[in-house]
Image (cartoon, rainbow, N blue to C red):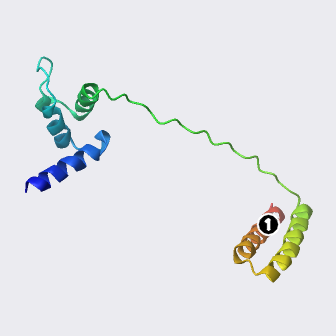
Amino acid sequence: MVEEESKKKDLKETKPLDKMTVKELKEIALEIPHDHENVAVSDMKKDELLTFIKEAREIKDEEPAKKKKKRQKKVTLSKQKIKEKISQLREEKKVVLETRDRKKIDLLRRRISRLKKQTRKIAQA
């Protein structure tokens, strides 16, 4: 039974503070020595508990760096250019069929299919 409690305690310590419940945060906050001048731990709300625990443990809030996605400019080809590309890929596919490289064959098949769809979209527009 003592082992179960220690396992639970270990799990709580590995769980990020933001994901913990108020009850779990209060348990952690009660273990931290402090004076009850402002607010008692039992009266604190979740955000207050988080700041209290982070200050006591000297944890700094660092937001993850946001990565900016670079948008690629869509290259719109004419219908004739797309058909030329399809014929090039078909020739390449014939060569790859002899080597029996399944991944490369599937890749070329998907590219050809995608280009065919583009020609249909151009025809509709």
Residue at x-position 45% and y-position 33%: 63
Q: Position of residue 35 (x, y in %)?
A: 12, 20
Q: Number of labelled discs?
A: 1
Q: Amino acid at mark 1?
A: Leu
- Please name the residue shown 14% across and 26% down the image: 33
Disc 1 element:
helix
Judge the density around disc 1: few (<14), some (14-19), many (≥20) Cα neighbours within 10 Å.
some
- The vertical placement of 55 against 17, above or below, is above
Between 78 and 4, the one lying in front of the other is 4
Return the x and y of residue 112 as percentages of the image width and height. 79, 70
- Mark 1 — residue? 115
Quadrant the N terminus occupies: bottom left
User: Residue 77: percent from the left, percent from the top?
Assistant: 86, 56
What residue is at 79 percent from the left and 80 percent from the top? 99
**Residue 125 found in image quarter:** bottom right
Judge by depth and name the residue closer to the eye, 29 or 118: 29
14 versus 116 height, above or below: above
- Above/below status of 47 relative to 124: above
